[in-house]
Image (cartoon, rainbow, N blue to C red):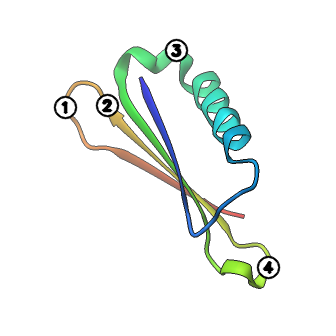
Amino acid sequence: MEIRVRFVGVAPSDAEAMISDVERRVNLALDRLAHRVREVRVSLSDVNGPRGGLDQQCVVTITPRHAGTPVVGRALE
């Protein structure tokens, strides 16, 4: 299972730590299904930019190993 993390419109000062944390959480959540998953893409973005407020968005796309349509989940905080 390949895990890709990207930041959109955000340049966190601790990007490496965030990437490690996201990878750890994805591995914990999908451990028992890893043999069925080809790729997990996690996109973290700041919807409103520097204005502040509750505007962080996380989009997770899971692509199955054998045929099928990618599954997309989205959360806004």
Query: Neighbour class for label 1 at 10 Å: few (<14), some, many (≥20)?
Result: few
Looking at the picture, which amino acid does disc 1 mark?
Answer: Ala
Amino acid under disc 2: Pro
Q: Nearer the viewer, mark 4 or mark 3?
A: 4
Counting from the top left corner in percent of width and height, residue 55 is at 70, 73
- Name the amino acid type tagged 4: Gly
Calculate the distance from the C-alpha at mark 1 to the C-alpha at mark 4: 40 Å
Quarter of the N terminus within the rendering: top left
Q: Which mark is residue 64?
A: 2
Circles 2 and 4: CB distance less than 8 Å? no
Circle 4 Cα neighbour tier, 10 Å, few/some/many (<14 / 14–19 / ≥20)? few
Compare marks 1 and 4 and give the one earlier in the sequence.
4
Kindly report the distance in space between the C-alpha atoms of the residues bearing marks 3 and 2.
Answer: 14 Å
Q: Earlier in the sequence, mark 2 or mark 4?
A: 4
> Which residue has dot 3 on it?
32
How much space separates mark 3 and mark 1, taking CA atoms? 19 Å
**In the foreground, 68 or 48:** 48
Q: Which residue is mark 4?
A: 52
Give left or right: position of 20 versus 52.
Answer: left
Q: Quadrant of the C terminus?
A: bottom right
Task: Evaluate if marks 1 and 2 touch, with contact meaning CB atoms under 8 Å apart.
Answer: yes
- Circle 1 sits in a helix, a strand or a loop, which is it? loop
Q: Which residue is mark 1?
A: 67
Name the residue: 61% across, 27% down. Answer: 29
